[in-house]
Image (cartoon, helix red, strand yellow):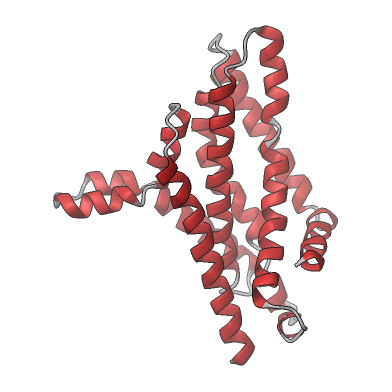
Amino acid sequence: MGAIYRREMGAFFTSGVAYVFLTVFTLLSGIFFFFGVIGSGTTETSPMFSSMFIVVLFLIPILTMKLLSEEKKNRTDQGLLTAPIGLWSIVLGKYFAALTLYIIAESVVFIYSLILAYLGDVVWPSLLGNYFAMLFLGAAFIAIGLFISSLTENQMASAVASMLALFVLYLFDSLASNVSIDFIRKIMLSFSFYSRYQEFTRGVFDLTSVVFFISVAFIFNFLTVRVLDRRRWG
C-alpha cells in the first residue's frame, strides 16, 4: 500500500491536480471565512463550514476522477492488478493519497484560527467539531468518487458522474420533504449527508453520524475492490 500511496501523492503534484485543488479550496474557504465569520463580527466558524459542504461536493471529484480511470485508459491497470499486491492495498493506497491531500487543504482552517485568535477568542470546540465533520464528510465522498472512477476510463465522465452522485446525496433532504409516506421519508433522511453534517456545524456531536460516514467510506472502498477483482478475472 505504501508504494501505491507514494506513487499517487507524486502524481497529484506532477499532474498539477494538487495545486489546482489546494488553490481553489483555499480561495473559496477564504471567501466564506471573510464574509461568514469576519464580516459578521464573530469568531464562530460554523457559518463558514456550513457553506463549505457544497464546495467539497464539487471539488472532491477533481481528486478522484483520475485515480482508477486513468489506469484503465492507459492500460496500466492490468499490470497493476497482476502485480504481487492485494487489491485492498491498491484501493487504500489511492484512497489515502486523496484523503491526505484533502486533509492538507482542510487544515487551512487553522490559519484562520490564528487570525481569529488575534481578533478575539477562538471557539475551539466548535472549530474542531466542524473540522472533523468536514473530514468525515470528505472521507465518505472520496470513497464514492474512487468507486465511480473505477467504473470508467474517461476522467471527465468520472468527474461529472461523481458530482452528480454527490449532488443527489445533497438533495436527499429536499427529496425526502416531498415524500408523503412517513417511513420512506424517515429512511431517506437517515441517509442524508447534509443533515448529518449540519448537526456538527450546530455543535451537536453525534456518534451515529461519525459511524455513518465511516461506514459509507468502507462500503464504497469495498465496492471498488469488487470492481477491480471482477476486472482481474474478467
User: Is residue 196 in view from this perspective?
Assistant: yes
**The N terminus appears in which quarter of the rendering?**
bottom right
User: Is residue 164 in view from this perspective?
Assistant: no
Q: How many marks?
A: 0
- Above or below for 202 versus 134: above
Residue 190 locus on image (x, y percent): 32, 49
Residue 224 locus on image (x, y percent): 56, 71
Left or right for 180, reference 107: left
**The C terminus appears in which quarter of the rendering?**
bottom right
- Above or below for 222 versus 187: below
Choose between 217 and 48: the one closer to the eye: 217
**Quarter of the figure with residue 150:** bottom right
Residue at (69%, 78%) from the top-left corner?
Answer: 86
- Above or below for 164 versus 48: below
Residue at (55%, 24%) from the top-left corner?
Answer: 125
Left or right for 2, reference 212: right
- Above or below for 107 versus 211: above
Residue at (43%, 27%) from the top-left corner?
Answer: 202
Left or right for 98, reference 218: right
Residue 194 locus on image (x, y percent): 41, 42
Residue at (85%, 57%) from the top-left corner?
Answer: 14
Residue 146 locus on image (x, y percent): 60, 64
Which residue is farthest bottom?
234
Choose between 176 and 198: the one closer to the eye: 198
